[in-house]
Amino acid sequence: MSTSSKDEATATRTNSNPGNFIRDRIAADQASGRFQGRVATRFPPEPNGYLHIGHAKAICIDFGLAREFGGTCNLRFDDTNPTTEDVEYVEAIKEDIRWLGFEWSNLHYASDYFEELYELAVKLIQKDKAYVDSLSEEQIREYRGDFYKKGRPSPYRDRPIAESLDLFERMRRGEFPEGAHVLRAKIDLETQNMNLRDPVLYRIRYTPHHRTGKAWCIYPMYDYAHPLSDALEKITHSLCTLEFESHRPLYDWCIREAEVFPSQQTEFARLNLTYTVMSKRKLAELVEKKVVSGWDDPRMPTLAGLRRRGYTPDAIRAFCERIGVAKTDSVVDVGLLEHCLREDLNQRCPRVMAVLKPLKVVIENFPEGEVRELSAPLHPEDPALGSRSMPFSRVLYVERDDFREDPPKD
């Protein structure tokens, strides 16, 4: 869609659902001159499956608010895990976003920034904020402790900076097998927030990447690549679902220690629908086990499936606007989504008539051979849709269930 004019944006703001704290926050940031009044958002899906109705809410928030405030919204594929990602999903995601009625300002991939992310990791090592750890995955989990037990420092935590720099460079060159080393942040092993207990920033993977091929054998973890990709794109408002709230301190740490653009993360409640599976992993399992015919099976809650079922993008956008943007999780009745579709179809669909169980009726006092053309409106409330012609003659067919030889009184 094209960018709305200032008048249209003002009208949208006036008529929009007031229950949107992110809209209020962005308006306050613009009023205060934060980020020089600029608004830049991004929609960052991982290309490891098709988008579902839950993603539609995030799409409408990211793209909708950027357009409303005259800003930009990038589409960025967070393609940091080559073992699960595929070009098929990249193209499907693009199609779904356009079908919903949005267009991105810029198209990016996290893999575009692999070199920059690597250099920033080197910078963290040089600042003694990261180190190469040679513990196994199981040992790292044990040393980190849990909610009830504080973490313990890895025996490699105080590895000399020069040694970590050398090992990290050799990891990139492919000198070690998978699992031999990882790069970890050096933060706080005693905090209750498990995300800050020296999280892994890089791991070794020898799986070819769908874009970079075999150029890289070390890949950044999502919690490292995500904030720094935001910063490299100078995103002002990084909007995430509520499960990333506990990750925000790590998001801020990465930006602060890497000394990059201060992108701001804000979390909102994800969309949960009654009777609806909203886990991409479980939906992928249905596809892999051939329980459904594919990601676009009409029984699936994916946007491709909803499209095949007959949902309109207008109905889905109206649904996302109606449920609002909250700070706490809740469950929305799927009936509201169906209601929004009925409302949309009611406004746009012409009416036709069908007789499913025909019963032949002969009107004996109607002239044989005569046919009268009657006019019926295509929409009871919208004359602009026009009318259709209905022939009326001696022989008619009515719905069997509507016929009574002895009709009820009145």
Image (cartoon, rainbow, N blue to C red):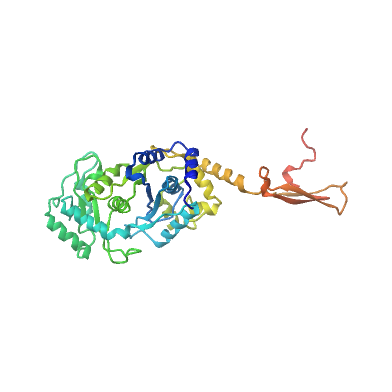
Q: Is residue 192 left or right of residue 377?
A: left
Q: In this rendered view, identify the residue nearer to me: 202 or 94.
A: 94
Residue 158 drawn at (x, y percent)? 12, 51
Residue found farthest to the bottom: 214
Residue 257 drawn at (x, y percent)? 21, 48
Q: Is residue 217 visible?
A: yes
Q: In this rendered view, identify the residue nearer to me: 165 or 37.
A: 37
Q: How many numbered marks, from 0 up? A: 0
Q: Is residue 262 left or right of residue 276?
A: left
- Which quadrant does the C terminus fall into? top right
Q: Is residue 131 left or right of residue 116?
A: left
Residue 180 drawn at (x, y percent)? 20, 59
Residue 161 drawn at (x, y percent)? 13, 55
Q: Is residue 332 visible?
A: no
Q: In this rendered view, identify the residue nearer to me: 360 or 302.
A: 302
Q: Is residue 112 left or right of residue 94?
A: left
Q: Which of the 4 quarters of the picture holds residue 243?
A: top left
Q: Residue at x 37, y 46 (%)?
A: 39
